[in-house]
Image (tube, rainbow, N blue to C red):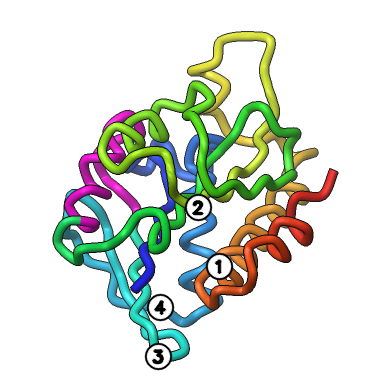
């Protein structure tokens, strides 16, 4: 069983903001795979699909970003998942240029509060798809909670599509080294 989590904040106010890229990728992934029936459970919106004989769960925590680990740990404990092998987290990263992806299998939070929360609940060993949102010279909160400007829309849409394809590869257990070579392009 796999758990694919997209990080973001609930509510229409935050839809399609930089900080909600994780939600957008999971929505794209659900669309690509024909996943329906999202329901409220485990402090999040969860859906599932059997893919190649394996149950895959899709989660959008509704706890707000800084408490994402609270939702994830409920699912991990309920299904007795091993985060190192069963958890894939998709989220925004200010240290990457807009449109770039970075795949990692473990590490620190890099200052991302959602990842800090997850690490505090499950440790630092879980697969990550980091989606580049660029960096601002101004207020970080306003930046991450803001919309992408028009000139970045195409790069963001391509990144969301690539991140969803990457998650499919991870679900189907394509060799991680091959996934990293394919998606961690400079």
Q: Are marks 2 and 1 in contact (CB under 8 Å)?
A: yes
Where is mark 1, residue-wise?
Answer: 170
How far apart in space, not on screen, are marks 3 and 2 (Cα)? 21 Å
Compare residues 63 and 71 and report the one nearer the observer. Answer: 71
Label 2 crowd (10 A; few <14 / some 14-19 / many >=20): many
What is the tally of numbered marks visible in this picture? 4
4 or 3: mark nearer the eye: 3
For label 3, the SS is loop
Label 3 crowd (10 A; few <14 / some 14-19 / many >=20): few
In the rendered image, residue 150, in percent from the top left (x then y), is placed at 74, 39
Figure quadrant of residue 10: top left
In the rendered image, residue 63, in percent from the top left (x then y), is placed at 24, 39
Q: Are marks 4 and 1 in contact (CB under 8 Å)?
A: no
* Residue at the extreme top: 138
In the rendered image, residue 133, in percent from the top left (x then y), is placed at 65, 35
Magenta residues: mostly which secondary structure?
Answer: helix
As drawn, the label of residue 40 is none
How far apart in space, not on screen, are marks 4 and 3 (Cα)? 15 Å
As drawn, the label of residue 127 is 2
Where is mark 3, residue-wise?
Answer: 53
- Give the residue drawn at x 56%, y 36%: 18
Q: Could you tell me which quadrant the N terminus lies in?
A: bottom left
């Amino acid at each position: 069983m796999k758990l694919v989590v997209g990080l973001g904040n609930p509510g229409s106010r935050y839809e399609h903001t930089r900080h909600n890229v994780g939600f957008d990728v999971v929505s794209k992934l659900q669309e690509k795979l024909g996943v329906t029936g999202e329901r409220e459970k485990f402090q999040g919106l969860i859906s599932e699909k059997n893919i190649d004989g394996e149950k895959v769960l899709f989660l959008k925590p509704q706890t707000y970003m800084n408490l994402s680990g609270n939702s994830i740990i409920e699912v991990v404990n309920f299904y007795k998942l091993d985060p190192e092998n069963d958890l894939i987290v998709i989220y925004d990263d200010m240290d990457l240029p807009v449109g770039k992806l970075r795949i990692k299998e473990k590490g620190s939070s890099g200052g991302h509060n959602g990842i800090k929360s997850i690490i505090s609940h499950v440790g630092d060993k879980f697969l990550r798809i980091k989606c580049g949102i660029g960096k601002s010279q101004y207020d970080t909160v306003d930046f991450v909670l803001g919309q992408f400007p028009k000139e970045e829309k195409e790069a963001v849409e391509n990144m969301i599509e690539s991140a969803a394809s990457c998650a499919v590869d991870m679900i189907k257990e394509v060799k991680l080294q091959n996934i990293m070579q394919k998606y961690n392009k400079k």
